Image: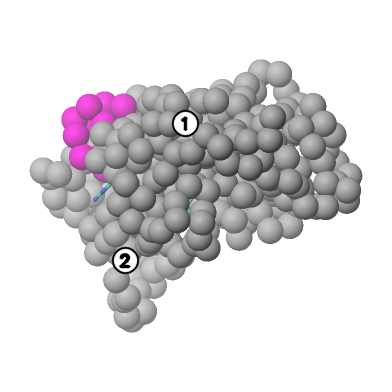
Amino acid sequence: MSTMRAVFITEQGGIDALQYRTDLPIPQPSPDAVLIKNRFIGVNYIDTYHRSGLYPVSLPFTLGKEGSGDVVEVGSNVKDFSVGDRVVYLGGGGSYAEYTTVPESGVEKLTDDSITYELGASIGIQALTAWTMVRDGYAVKKGDTVLVHAAAGGVGLLLCQMAHHLGATVIGTVSTDEKAQLARANGADHTIVYSRENTVERVNEITNGLGCHAVLDGVGKDTFQDSLAVTRRLGTLISFGNASGAVPPISISCLAPKNIKLMRPQLFAYLAEREESQKWWGEVFDLLKRKVIHLHVHKVYDLKDAKQAHIDIESRKTTGKLLIKL
Ligand code: NDP
């Protein structure tokens, strides 16, 4: 068979920019890449930015930045992978497809049978993002108070679990009572329903006016100013996403009154070297095996229903991870 199913765009825009085709050519791996037959594909908020135009892409563009499956072909320079390997991967030529080419550097073997294809595709971007932030962005320690925005989301639930495991008091913000309940079940000690409660007032109540050692903000435009207000003196604000839109330009002098450290991380910059990437993957696999983290899968979609996955995640109706199964 030489054709495959895939979801791609030829121009950026709304939901209807997503095109599903069943007759696209199966890509060929370059010398440094492997060809993977996908089993599960992870849906991430970043996919909506690639579709909408918030993040630029070269067109045509196949959506998707993570998946799991089997290596079915290896490029001539590939040393560490063979046909038949069970793998997970980040990056590559678009995962919303039956087959994806991925540079060897973006692929990790699934050597432990307890990590299924479904788990593998679920933990890549979201767990690595969460873990790099709580270990490197701000090294969370016992006794800290950490605020997690969108605490019932994909990254959010993992941040709650991880920060709780590291000994922090976790405050999670969410838009509904159901999401608050889920965040609490995943390690949040306090929840703020920010659709009806004032985040700054509530954090001040909880922290006796001191604020949080670290604020983890993937919501962006709508929450940035509150995040700044609830970061304590000498604290760290990590702004890692734009679910409500991009944070407008700020004057760095806003950090001065409390000597706040501000970080805007991007996961892929943590994974540039093979050794770094293996270290972070190894730690996340270990967290899974020790059951420090567990996954909450919201829904598994068919590839032809990728539009619905984008509609759902953008409408704030989802919790945890969205997957596509092939
Ligand atoms: P989520 O599952 O967290 O979905 C986004 C959540 O954001 C929603 O469920 C919603 O939760 C909240 N939200 C608040 N305002 C809005 C709005 N106006 N529109 C839509 N959602 C809103 O997605 P992910 O876990 O995939 O990603 C979370 C964030 O992390 C994103 O901003 C993403 O870009 C970022 N990210 C950054 C990475 C990096 O390397 N820097 C890597 C991976 C993710 P609620 O209803 O409770 O408000």
Whether residue 311 can be seen here = yes
Which residue corresponds to the image point at 63% horizontal and 36% vertical from the top-left? 3
Above or below, 248 against 102 in this view is below
Which residue corresponds to the image point at 56% horizontal and 29% vertical from the top-left? 40
What x and y, as percent, mark residue 310?
A: 35, 41
Which residue corresponds to the image point at 15% horizontal and 44% vertical from the top-left? 195
Label 2 environment density (alpha carbons within 10 Å; few <14, some 14–19, many ≥20): some
Above or below, 301 against 57 in this view is above
What x and y, as percent, mark residue 50?
A: 43, 55
Nearest the viewer among 140 and 262 is: 262
User: Helix, strand or loop at disc 1?
Assistant: helix
Colour mode?
one colour
Mark nearer the N terminus (2 vs 1): 2
Q: Which residues are magenta?
A: 169-182
Q: Is residue 223 left or right of residue 285?
A: left
Q: Is residue 191 left or right of residue 46?
A: left
Residue 273: name its quadrant. Answer: bottom right
Give me the C-alpha separation between circle 2 and circle 1: 32 Å
Above or below, 287 against 221 in this view is above
The amino acid sitting under disc 1 is Leu
What x and y, as percent, mark residue 175?
A: 20, 40
Q: Is residue 180 magenta?
A: yes
Which is in the foreground here, disc 2 or disc 1?
A: 1
Quadrant position of the N terminus in the picture = top right
Q: Which residue is mark 2?
A: 247
Residue 19: name its quadrant. Answer: top left
Quadrant position of the C terminus in the picture = top right
Q: Which numbered circle lies on residue 303?
A: 1
The amino acid sitting under disc 2 is Val
